[in-house]
Image (spheres, helix red, strand yellow):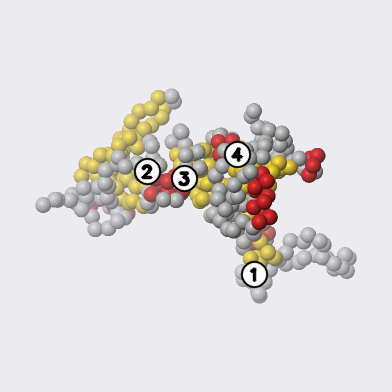
Amino acid sequence: MNLMQKVEQAQIRDDLPEMHPGDNVKVHVQVIEGNRTRTQVFQGIIIAMRGDGVRASFKVRKLSFGVGVERTFPMHSPIIEKVEIVARGDVRRAKLYYLRDRIGKAAKVKEKRFN
Amino acid sequence: MTVKAIVGRKAGMTQVWSEDNHLLPVTVIEVQPVRIVRVKTVEKDGYNALQVTFGAARRKINKPEQGHFDAAGVEAGRELLELRMDDVSGFEVGQEIPLDTFEPGDMVDVSGISKGKGFAGVMKRHNFAGQRATHGAHLVHRMPGSIGQCATPARVFKGKKMAGHMGNQKVTQQNLVVVKVDTELGALMVKGAVPGAKNGLVTVKNAVKKKVQA
C-alpha cells in the first residue's frame, strides 16, 4: 500500500451495512445545536450511490410534507451514527432519478423478496 | 523569517474530516527525516543555509559526493539541497530535522516545480481575453492583439506579456494550513493544493507572512 492508500484507509469506516440503490434506509445523523448534539433520523430511499474509497457518497430521497427532499451523505462521514436498512428495494437501475418525476403510488420502489 | 523548513515528496490529494466534521481538501506530502550535511553561515559562506539530504540514495553516488557525505558522517540520501534559514545557530551537522517540526494549525509556504505546459499561447499563459469568435474574426481568435504603439517608441517594451514557455518553474504557494502531522506514516497534510506533479519534490517552510509562535 502506498502512502495515499494508507491515509485514505485510515478514514474508511467498516461499520455500515451493505447498501444499494432502492433500499429504504434510516440514516441517524448527528446535529449540533449550539453546544449540544442530538441525533436526527433521515429516512428515505437511496436513489444514487457514487464514488469509491473515502469519496463515496449516497443520496437519500424522502417526501416531507408533500415536498421531495434529497440529501447527499458522504459514506464515511463521522456525522453518520448508524444506517438502518428498513427494506431492500427491487430495482433495475443504479440511479433512480425517475422517482423525482413521479407522485404518490408511482413513486414507490418494489420491495425485494428473498426466496 | 525562515525558522522551520523540511523537504518532502508530493504524494497526492485527498480529503479528510476536520475535528468539527467538515470535509477538508488536503495535499499529502510524504516526509522523511531530513539529515543535515553542512551548515552554511554568513561568516563563511555569505548566507545562512542548511545543506540537507533525506531518504536513501536512488542512484550511484560518485566518489567526490561520497567523500562529502563521509566528511559529515551522514548517510548519502536521495537529493542534496539547501534550505535557506535566518538563523542556523541551533543546527549541527548530522542532526535530523523530524517531521513534527510542524504542528497542525501552523501556516506554511510550500514550494515546488510546477507542471510544464510547453510553449503556451497568451490566453493560457497570461489570461488574455483573446478575440471574437465571429463577426469577421479570421485566424485571430486566440491572438494577443496589439503589442505596442507606432513610430514612438518604434519598439516593443521589454517584459511585454507574450506567448512562450510556461510552467516547469519554481512556484511557492503561501499561507497553507497544516491539517495533520502523522509521524507514523511520515505524512504531512496541508489544506489545499500544492505546486507540481505527484512525486515532485516540495519544500515546506513556515509562512513568511505569519509570525511564528515560539
Give the Cα distance between marks 3 and 1: 39 Å
**Residues behind callouts 3 and 2 on a single chain:** no
Subunit of label 1: B
With respect to residue B123, does B137 lie above or below?
below
Q: Residue furthest right?
A: B152
Mark closer to the chain start, 3 or 1: 3
| Residue holding disc 3 | B15
**Residues behind callouts 3 and 1 on a single chain:** yes
* Residue at the (61%, 69%) spot, across then down: B133
Subunit of label 2: A
Give the Cα distance between marks 3 and 4: 30 Å
Mark number for residue A12?
2
With respect to residue B181, does B133 lie above or below?
below
Residue A101 in sight? no
Give the Cα distance between marks 1 and 4: 55 Å
Q: Residue B73 is drawn in which quadrant?
A: top right
Instruction: Please rate how many residues cluster around mark 2, counting C-alpha atoms within 10 Å: few if below 14, some from 14 to 19, many from 20.
Output: some
**Residues behind callouts 1 and 4 on a single chain:** yes
With respect to residue B148, does A111 lie above or below?
above
Give the Cα distance between marks 3 and 2: 11 Å
Instruction: Please rate how many residues cluster around mark 4, counting C-alpha atoms within 10 Å: few if below 14, some from 14 to 19, many from 20.
Output: some
Mark number for residue B96?
4
Please identify, in this view, whether the residue under mark 4 or under mark 2 is nearer the observer: 4
